[in-house]
Image (cartoon, rainbow, N blue to C red):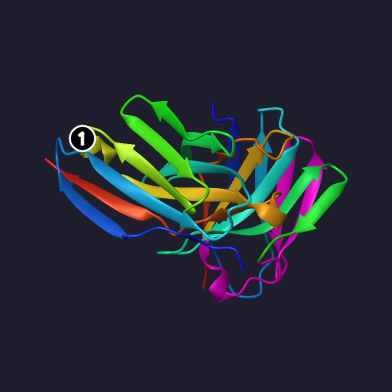
């Protein structure tokens, strides 16, 4: 079974710190990987989409990388702010199930003022 | 106005009742999806549709049915709701290519008593 894993499940950091969120997947035949942000009781907001031909994507203080050989993606958040507090989910479109995204269970980030 | 709109946003119902969740989109996307999210878990795919005549089961389709009334409308039905279908339900859309980005609605919170 294809899986996407996010560790840790929760993370607390002080404001201003740079941080990295991790996402691993079991199938190196990946089409793309998408990072989302979810605020409590809300929908998912797309942050970054990395195609299999790309190594990274950047948007503002966010940078996402993709390493197909190791089955890993990271989301780097620079100079974290309390407003960054949310759950971050990664989702990969993998191999034989290219029609479907497989989601990780998310990392709940708290940025302390 | 939201590009992907779900109604109702909140619903409380009783075991055995029939429930319909509706989704409409103004993004002009052909592909539409229904996901379920349970606390602490990632999203699980219930059904997906790549065009009006194409309906496919996802990971957890048992107990659910869907209808694609038009390109812009995709509804999810629970024919006889049961308590373990209590969850947050999301509709999503994407463009017609496997590398497309996924866009989500705000979610419909369903409670089955």
Q: Based on the displayed image, in which of its 4 quarters is residue B97 positioned?
A: top right
Q: Based on the displayed image, in which of its 4 quarters is residue A31 positioned?
A: top right
Give the residue at x 20% y 35%: A81
B96 relative to A107, above or below? above
Q: Which sits in the foreground, B16 or A55?
A: A55
Q: Which residues are magenta?
A: B60-87
Give the residue at x 45% y 33%: A56
Name, please, the residue furthest toward the right: B53
**From the viewer's perspective, is A76 left or right of B24?**
left
Give the residue at x 66% y 28%: B26
Q: Which sits in the foreground, A76 or B96?
A: A76
Identify the secondary structure beneath mark 1: loop
Where residue A47 sits in the image (x, y, percent)? 44, 35
Residue A66 shows in this picture? yes
**From the viewer's perspective, is A28 left or right of B42?**
right
In which chain is the residue bearing label 1?
Answer: A
Please give the residue where the numbered disc 1 appears in the rendered image.
A81
B53 relative to A51, above or below? below
Q: Is residue B27 magenta?
A: no
Q: Is residue B85 magenta?
A: yes
Give the residue at x 31% y 28%: A61
């Amino acid at each position: 079974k294809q899986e996407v894993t996010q560790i840790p499940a929760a993370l607390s950091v002080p404001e201003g710190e740079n941080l990295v969120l991790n996402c691993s997947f079991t199938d190196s035949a990946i089409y793309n990987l998408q990072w989302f942000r979810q605020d409590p009781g809300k929908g998912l907001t797309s942050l970054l989409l990395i195609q299999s031909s790309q190594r990274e994507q950047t948007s503002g203080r966010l940078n996402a990388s993709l390493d197909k050989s190791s089955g890993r993606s990271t989301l780097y958040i620079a100079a974290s702010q309390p407003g960054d507090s949310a759950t971050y989910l990664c989702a990969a479109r993998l191999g034989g199930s290219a029609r479907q995204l497989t989601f990780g269970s998310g990392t709940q980030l708290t940025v302390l003022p | 106005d939201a590009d992907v709109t779900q109604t109702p946003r909140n619903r409380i119902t009783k075991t055995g009742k029939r429930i319909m969740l509706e989704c409409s989109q103004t993004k002009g996307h052909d592909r539409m999806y229904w996901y379920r999210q349970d606390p602490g878990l990632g999203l699980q795919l219930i059904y997906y549709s790549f065009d009006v005549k194409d309906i496919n089961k996802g990971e957890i389709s048992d107990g659910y049915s869907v209808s694609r009334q038009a390109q812009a409308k995709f509804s999810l039905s629970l024919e006889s709701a049961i308590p373990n279908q209590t969850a947050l339900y999301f509709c999503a859309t994407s463009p017609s290519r496997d590398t497309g980005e996924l866009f989500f609605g705000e979610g419909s919170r369903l409670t089955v008593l």
